[in-house]
Image: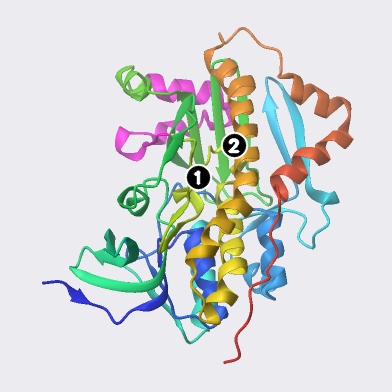
Amino acid sequence: MAQTNGGTDILIVGGGPAGMMAGLLFARAGLRTTVLEKHADFLRDFRGDTVHPSTLDLFDELGLLDKLLHRPHDAVARVSVPFGDRLYHVADFGHLPVRAKFIAMMPQWEFLDFVADAARSYPHFTLRMNCEAVATLTIAGRIAGIATSRGEEIRARLVIAADGRRSILRAAAALPLRDLGAPMDVFWFRLAKPRTPDNRTTGFFAPGRVIALIDRGEYWQCAYLFPKGAAAAVRAAGLPAFRAEVARAAPLLAPLVGQLVDWDGIKLLPVALDRLTRWHRPGLLAIGDAAHAMSPIGGVGINLAIQDAVAAANILAGAMAAGDDPDPLLARVQGRRMLATRIVQRLQRLAHDRIITPLLSARPAAAAPPLALRLLQRWPILQRIPARMIGLGIRREHIRSPTADF
């Protein structure tokens, strides 16, 4: 028989960026807030590490930016990519109207650990690690809580699904999903390297080959892009062929590819681009990747997820603290965030169609740089446009949720 928990105001399933930020803000508003994370810790590799200026600005509004930046990170004030034998500058964040005019390259486990520590300062916050939600509880047509893999039932006034692009809760709640398609998948792997004085995160774009490199200090976190569904063919060609392709795609990796000794260290990430057409039903709201899976293009997924959490708290926290029913307000969260989601996904699809697909399908000898890169070099002032789109996003949120008196 299931054991029933005493209940909570806000039950957040998923301890990623959206879930942890929502947990912090709802607890700050004085609501009993519980976050469930199915893993025992935050230490998982091959997660996004780009904390953009829009997110840094939110922590500045909370008075937490200086403490956040005490965590290990590198500041990236300008984004450039090599194409052929030339370096192309893409985005310059120096002109943004925020205090932190850079992307903080911070391991996601450091970021999540920081947010968890900040949330624990509020008396009504609980983080339960190694606790997996497996089903929703429905009473009279309304989601009233969740069941865990331990056989426990947890009741809540509102359940927030922040459990990622393979969300169990959105499936259990039968929320309608629209698949927008993505032309590529990714192999992730790491290669040890010497630490450099500055962060050298970059990407290599050449006909037939695309690879992104995230500088993690002592190693490169590498993303090798290839056409959707071609993972088996890449593996079938053999590890020596893969090492040779990586070296050709990113010449600076040529001395390092010998570290790839088997396929176990090369992880497949199927790229998805999709969104729910309805993010809610009575008792439940989906945010972050559970509401919209983003392409890796621009590294904006974390930051959009956090914007969702802020919007949810802005709209719901004060009303729920006053005892109001959250259900009539859930559509407002989707309405607030859907425009930004649509625009960013449209831009990502444009990049897929105009840049990624032509490059992955091109012969290695073919190749003029994409028109966008050429325009950005000819008129450097244009670099402010991608800087604003990447750094601040669309319909940027600000902290408007209340702070309770404790």
Nearer to us in this view, 349 or 195: 349
Q: Toward which corner of the image does residue 271 lie, by quadrant?
A: top left
Please give the range of residues in magenta: 241-270
Instruction: Give the percent coordinates (x, y) of residue 284.
Output: 41, 61
Callout 1 amino acid: His
Nearer to us in this view, 250 or 329: 329
Magenta stretch: dominant secondary structure: helix
Query: Relative to 130, is 87 on the left or the right?
Result: right
Taking 63 as reference, is 16 above or below it? above
Residue 105 seen in the current view: yes
- In the picture, the disc for residue 319 is none
Instruction: Give the percent coordinates (x, y) of residue 319.
Output: 57, 75
Badge 2 element? helix
Taking 194 as reference, is 351 above or below it? above
Q: What residue lies at 34% left-to-right and 69% top-to-bottom?
A: 129
Query: Relative to 322, is 78 on the left or the right?
Result: right
Q: What residue lies at 75% left-to-right and 35% top-to-bottom?
A: 90
The residue that label 1 is drawn on is 292
133 inside magenta stretch? no
The residue that label 2 is drawn on is 345
Q: What's the CA distance linking mark 2 and mark 1?
A: 9 Å
Q: Are marks 2 and 1 in contact (CB under 8 Å)?
A: yes
